[in-house]
Image (tube, helix red, strand yellow):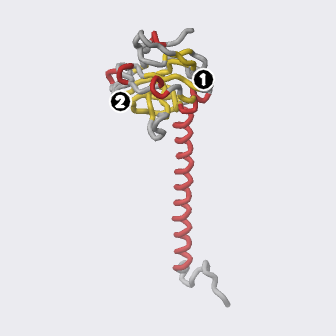
Amino acid sequence: MTIRDDAMTPTGARPAKSLHRTMLRGVLGKTFRLVGYTIQYGCIAHCAFEYVGGVVMCSGPSMEPTIQNADIVFAENLSRHFYGIQRGDIVIAKSPSDPKSNICKRVIGLEGDKMLTNSSSSFFKSHSYVPMGHVWLEGDNLQNSTDSRSYGPIPYGLIRGRIFFKIWPLSDFGFLRDSPNGHRFSDD
């Protein structure tokens, strides 16, 4: 006569080996459920930040006075996916000179626009056209901004999102103001 592992002993108690298996199954089941939920909610969070938007901190003086150093803003990503970026929008983009960092700049020109490519002095002016699939970006603080005037137009694919709302500091909470350099937008 053989005794099964899950058989009851004459006193009605389960053997220790069976009890350990039951406990192990319970712990493993809870662990796998936790891992599953973590992966599931991680995927949801990733999709929300990748496709809907997120909170961004812009650093540097190039967007002053519109965005001060270390202001916290909200960037939405749907405009970039549906090619809804327009002249005058503030965007966050991968830096063309350092792909590990992001830049916050204003879109001054879209593909096909004629742009002034040198300083604003009236003595030597040169122009170029923004090629297909590219945008021209400039900071609002023209005297202290490294932008498309230095590195040229950037590919549309480097744009990560459109910034339109300031969250911090609370004294500036709300939608961002228009460009102080509206005269730089090309109309010809």
Dots 2, 1 in contact, CB < 8 A: no
Q: Is residue 25 above or below residue 149?
A: below
Question: Which structural element holds mark 1?
Answer: loop
Residue that badge 2 annotates = 60
Q: Residue 139: where, in percent of width, then height?
A: 42, 22
Mark 1 surroundings: few (<14), some (14-19) or many (≥20) residues within 10 A: some
Question: Which structural element holds mark 2?
Answer: loop
Mark 2 or mark 1: name the one nearer the start of the chain. Answer: 2
Please identify the quarter of the rendering in which residue 86 is found. top right
Q: Split into 4 quadrants, where in the image is the C terminus?
A: top right
Q: Is residue 169 above or below residue 51?
A: above
Mark 2 surroundings: few (<14), some (14-19) or many (≥20) residues within 10 A: some
Q: Residue at x 60, y 30 (%)?
A: 81
Number of numbered tags placed on the structure image: 2
Q: Which residue extends farthest right?
A: 1
Please identify the quarter of the rendering in which residue 65 is found. top left
Q: Residue at x 47, y 13 (%)?
A: 125
**Amino acid type indicated by mark 1:** Pro
Which of 109 and 18 lies nearest the eye of the viewer? 109
Q: Is residue 100 above or below residue 87?
A: below
Kindly identify which numbered label has been placed on residue 131: 1
Which of 41 and 66 lies nearest the eye of the viewer? 66
Closer to the camera: disc 2 or disc 1? 1
Horizontally, residue 123 falls left or right of residue 169, namely right
**Amino acid type indicated by mark 2:** Gly
Please identify the quarter of the rendering in which residue 103 is found. top left
Q: Residue 18: where, in percent of width, then height?
A: 56, 76
